[in-house]
Amino acid sequence: MTPPKVGPDVPYTFGIIGDLGQTYASNETLYNYMSNPKGQAMLFVGDLSYADDHPNHDQRKWDSYGRFVEPSAAYQPWIWAAGNHEIDYAQSISETQPFKPYKNRYHVPYKASQSTSPLWYSIKRASTYIIVLSSYSTYDKYTPQNSWLQDELKKVNRSETPWLIVLVHAPWYNNNNYHYMEGESMRVTFEPWFVENKVDIVFAGHVHAYERSERISNIHYNITDGMSTPVKDQNAPIYITIGDGGNIEGIANSFTDPQPSYSAFREASFGHALLEIKNRTHAHYTWHRNKEDEAVIADSIWLKNRYYLPEEETA
């Protein structure tokens, strides 16, 4: 497939899936996505084959997973982020190199963005600048990933690629009891940069459910002044957790109660999403719940670009 030209008003549609695995539910998710002709590229937020959930990290599961996604991945690009199941090393069988199967099987264009690792990189697609980060690599000050991201954000030209999207695996804002607060240290490290650079959306997986936040930030945390909870911030991203691809471990159906005001929508169901970039100012996002032999739109929102429409609230 020939990549689209890069430009501020080039329309483009992304699919979004995370934590897919290779189960009956996984098959429903992929089938439903492929049944919609709009998707032109896949943003995949980690946890591919789940080979490490099988005895001796059965590498045949990587083979079968490749065949499983081939009907889509052979005809459109899949932009990969690595999850915890890609760490995939079993010390019990003397395997100590993390991410080995993933890095050898799934190649990404990391050198083109001057990254030193395939676990973090960037790619431009139509009117969108996509940054992929690794939740399971070091990211503190002076680490390679931290230094790379700091430099990479300076390269983003919003007059060329107005939409700025980030993929991670562990969510920064998660109101499910599963994996609660696991992404907190990464959030504290990078969130000020995301607000400063007006990132539009952060997609994550890991939690096997779906949740979408309002535009929020928690960068002024000061418990002595009572500033200890996220607040609405029109310069901040929307955070979407979409680890509901199907996986072998089941659905994460234990949300915290009550639902926080900054959590706009959440549901413990399998599914996929579409992000339709219309032009430099507007995009339409939909989450499609698996239901029997079809996908049902259960959540949708019009997005207004943070760079071109910074003061307008998301509809």
Image: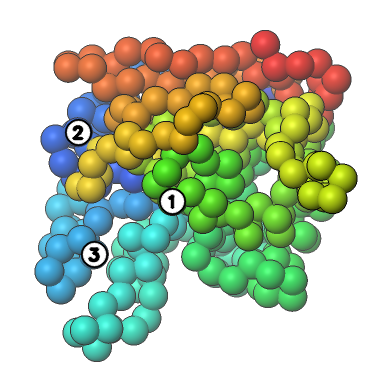
Residue 45 visible in the snapshot: no
Element assignment for label 3 = helix
Marks 1 and 2, the one that precedes in the sequence: 2
> What amino acid type should be assigned to the residue bearing mark 1?
His
Say which of marks 1 and 2 sits in front: 1
- Which is nearer the eye, 279 or 2? 279
Amino acid type of the residue tagged 3 in the rendering: Asp
Badge 2 local density, few (<14 within 10 Å), some, or many (20+)? many
How far, Cα to Cα, is label 2 from label 3?
A: 19 Å
Q: Secondary structure at mark 2?
A: helix
Which sits earlier in the primary sequence, circle 2 or circle 3?
2
- For the C terminus, the quadrant is top right
Kindly indicate the quadrant of the structure image that contains residue 51: bottom left
Please report the residue visible at 58 percent of the width from the left and 28 percent of the height from the top. Answer: 260
Residue 130 place in picture, x, y as percent: 61, 43
Closer to viewer: mark 3 or mark 1? 1
> Which label number is shown at residue 52?
3
